[in-house]
Amino acid sequence: MSELVFFSGTMDSGKSTLALQTAHNHAARGRDGLLFTRQDRAGRAVISSRLGLEQPALEVEDDTDFWGEVIGRRLHGEPVDYVVADEAQFYTAVQVEQLARVVDELGVDVYAFGITTDFRARLFPGSARLVELADRVEVLQVKSLCWCGARATHQARTVDGEMVVEGEQVVIGDTAQGGKIAYEVLCRRHHMRHMTQAAARAQSRVPQTLEAAVEDRS
């Protein structure tokens, strides 16, 4: 039976790499599919991996209708056996419902890939609806690591090197430090403390009293 699967993970957990591998595996078995993405780091209409892999894809806009995209192709004799939907956190709740309808009524497998929560540790609308509707939610097994070595579970946004917890939910930046807007993965403990790698390095250069050092390890 066809299914809607949501593959969730933080940045650097290999979501886009797995999306491309999934598309490759299905295509290698003679299946026909569609690839979608939205606001990929490499630009429009492309799924890119930090490992250097890229593949053209259809860019999702606010008015993209997944049901219309699939049914339109089938009406013109084009088979669609599966859909790979990358950066699914940026989709609207209605678009996720369209993907579910594609699965249920057209028998198309849909594989969605995305980040679950934003820089404020709050659910993206697309991710929230996927969690509610998906047949399966798979947490990627590749561990992103916080600067402390613990498993990273949250995304942090920095502006000029300082972590921020207010602002627009979607602002495109880079994970490389040094830009005006950047993103970094952190464990929950250091996300809640607003302790990025840069902040930790700066703090380590400041002499600490015994009391402060004990508190920092707690």
Image (spheres, rainbow, N blue to C red):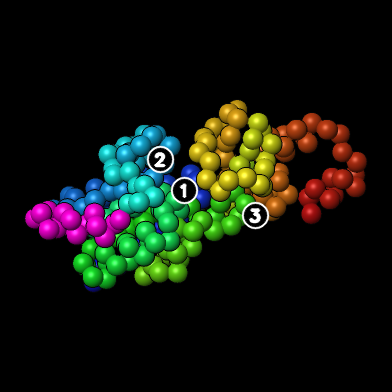
Q: Residues within 10 Å of mark 1 (few under 14, many from 20)?
A: some
Q: Is residue 42 left or right of residue 28?
A: right
Above or below for 94 versus 177: below
* Residue drawn at the location 54% of the way across and 58% of the way down: 123
- 63 relative to 152 in the view: left or right: left
Q: Kindly identify which residue carries mark 3.
A: 188
Expressed as whole percent of the image width and height from the top left, the position of residue 210 reads: 90, 44
Secondary structure beneath label 1: loop
Q: Residue at x 41, y 41 (%)?
A: 39
- Identify which amino acid the numbered label 1 is placed on: Ser
Q: Which mark is residue 40?
A: 2
Instruction: Choose the circle earlier in sequence order: 2 or 3.
Output: 2
Q: Tell me the SS state at disc 3.
A: helix
Asked if the residue under mark 3 is in contact with the one under mark 1, i.e. CB atoms within 8 Å, the reply is no
Q: CA distance from mark 2 to mark 3?
A: 25 Å
The region drawn magenta spans 65-81
Image disc number at residue 112: none
Mark whose residue sits in front, 2 or 3: 2
- Point out residue 61 in the picture as x, y percentages from the top left corner: 36, 47
Choose top left, top right, bottom left or bottom right for residue 212: top right
Residue 191 lies in the magenta-colored region = no
Work out whether residue 15 can be spotted. no
Say which residue label 1 marks: 13
Packing grade of label 3 (10 A; few <14, some 14-19, many >=20) is some
Relative depth, front residue between 165 and 141 = 165
Measuring 86% from the left and 34% from the top, which residue is drawn there? 207
Q: Of all residues shown, which one is farthest toward the front?
A: 63
